Amino acid sequence: MGRVRGKVRLRAMGVDDAEALWRWNHDADVMRWMDEGYAETVAQVAKWLEERPPNAYGDVLFGVEAEKTLIGLVRLHGAEPEVGLADMDIYLGEKDFWGRGFGTDTVRAVCLYGFRKMRLRKITLTVAAENVSAQRVYRKVGFVEEGRLRGTFRDAEGRWADKLTMGLFESELTPTS
């Protein structure tokens, strides 16, 4: 997709990205706010990337690059042309890039892609209620809190917590700062 007025570049992911993805998935700091699956080997991650259907309207997955380094991934999924709605997932796995605006630029870039290329009407997401740094990023881009899902996130210590649902219409997308 290329650069979108910011610090990041979105690109398709491939088998060569398996080692970075595996490393992030096994880092407790990276996975702190994620719904974790079961541990996988690098070979299993590579197989998933190889067998994953190509990007299409219903599900697009991008690697996030900054300074010529793969730093994370972002996904729009569950999109249906009849309603123009998609869910967004994001995480930045390279901790050296945290707190430097790359998350904000990634969210803005994928939202621009969703609205302009996919012609989406709305993008939604869920976020752990205690993950205030992610909420700050989403609000900065224009997302609005729409609801609370009680007791649906299990943290690393096994405690159940709430998730927030947030949504964004194209007209709410803030310009780059």
Image (spheres, rainbow, N blue to C red):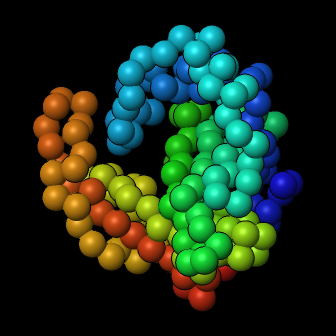
Q: Residue at x 30, y 52 (%)?
A: 128
Residue extending farthest to the bottom is: 171
Spot occupied by residue 165 in the image (x, y as percentages of width and height)? 34, 66
Whether residue 93 is visible here, answered yes or no, is yes
Q: Kindly give the residue lying farthest to the front in the view shown.
A: 82
Quadrant location, the C terminus: bottom right
44 vs 37: above or below: above
Residue 109 in picture, x, y percent from top left: 70, 63
Residue 159 lies, in percent from the top left, at 13, 37
Q: Quadrant of residue 125?
A: bottom left
Q: Quadrant of residue 101?
A: bottom right
Is 175 drawn above or below residue 39 in the view shown?
Answer: below
Question: Along the horizontal axis of the image, is 57 left or right of 68?
Answer: left
For the residue pair 22 and 176, the one nearer the viewer reads as 22
Residue 91 appears at what percent x and percent y? 53, 44
Q: Count numbered badges in the picture.
A: 0
Identify the residue at image location x=59%, y=33%. 94
Q: Quarter holding the N terminus? A: bottom right
Residue 108 in sight: no
In the displayed structure image, the side of residue 32 where residue 169 appears, left or right: right
Residue 147 lies in quadrant: bottom left
| In this view, 24 is above or below 176 | above
Residue located 71% across and 39% down the image: 53
At a point 54% along the width and 59% down the height, the residue shown is 78
